[in-house]
Image (spheres, helix red, strand yellow):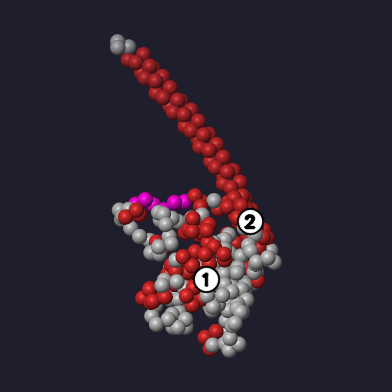
Amino acid sequence: MKNPKVGLAILALVLGAVVIGGLAGWQIRQQNVAGVSQAQDAGSASEGKDILRATYDPIHFRPAIEKATDEQCLACHREVLDDKVRETSPAGIKAANSKAWYQRMSTYTGEQDTFHRRHLTTPMAKELMNLSCTTCHQGSDPRDEAPGTSATGTPQSDNGFTLRKTVNPETTCLKCHGQMNATVMGLPSPWPESKEMFGNSCVTCHAAIRTNRHQVTYLKADAIEAAGQANGDVCYGCHGGRAWYRIEYPYPRHPWEGMSPDVPDWAKNRPVESEARFVLPAGGQSKK
């Protein structure tokens, strides 16, 4: 270029255009970021209000929780039934090639399944059990799940839950996952070792002893009795066969016909009635 002044002028125009364009783009990006941020803040605020409202919904507290239906619970907690077990563990073990602890009994059929589904939707659960969400869960106090730690929290005298657990294992899980006390029952050895001696049938003895059993809302008594007659593993499955704990559950000793008036030492502190909330309505069968 012969005239250097013209070249400098063109360069100045180019640089000016770049600077102006860059500033304009930066402003547009800032406006977009601000808009997205405002939308996120509004969404977070709205979501926060919804979570707070749901957390303190009356259904999580007494007395509403005592009459809550499964449909009401699952409206927000549907994932407990939709979740499935992994086909392959992080270590590479396939579920189909391994046995879970609850699959040890002959009464469990099918593939491995999740905790809540095993108690609510599996064939065995539907056949023998009548569990609902509130059978185990008696609400959820978000203030503190450690009884007696605040003036407004659940008192220590309440057995609704233990420490940070949403249920109290001693009064819920232990019902069906405690050890069998073979000594108290007069067995010569633990049931797996002595069951053949009794034809693998608990009814061999229990046809006349403790005949008033399973009469609670969360069990299907007639179905359990029929299944137990055919296979002793049905009985043992909940009475030691799937034990989570080293202790047994102190079942109520409901009086039965021909019951001895003498109470053995091990049973002197046992209740004689089930918990009031599990007592069957007039007629003797659950509504479900």
Figure check: 14 above or below 38 = above
Q: Nearer the viewer, mark 2 or mark 1?
A: 1
Q: Which residue is mark 1?
A: 175
Relative to 11, say whether 246 is above or below.
below
Question: Residue 14 placed where, x, y %?
Answer: 39, 20
Residue 170's x, y, as percent?
A: 52, 73
Q: Residue furthest top?
A: 2
**Residue 84 is a magenta residue:** yes
Q: Is residue 133 magenta?
A: no
**233 or 96: nearer the eye?**
233
How would you rate the neighbour count of disc 2 (Cα within 10 Å): few for under 14, some for 14-19, many for 20 or more?
some
Q: In the rendered view, would you say 151 is above or below 102? A: below
Say if residue 201 shows up in the picture. Answer: yes
What is the tally of numbered marks visible in this picture? 2
Q: Quadrant of residue 213?
A: bottom right
Q: Residue at x 32, y 55 (%)?
A: 97
Q: Quadrant of the C terminus?
A: bottom right
- Give the Cα distance between marks 2 and 1: 22 Å
Dot 1 amino acid type: Lys
Occupied quadrant, residue 254? bottom right
Residue receiving disc 2: 69
Q: Position of residue 178 (x, y in %)?
A: 47, 73
> Which segment is the magenta one?
83-89
Residue 148 seen by the camera: no
Q: What element does badge 2 sit on? A: loop
Please, what is the dominant secondary structure of the magenta stretch?
Answer: loop
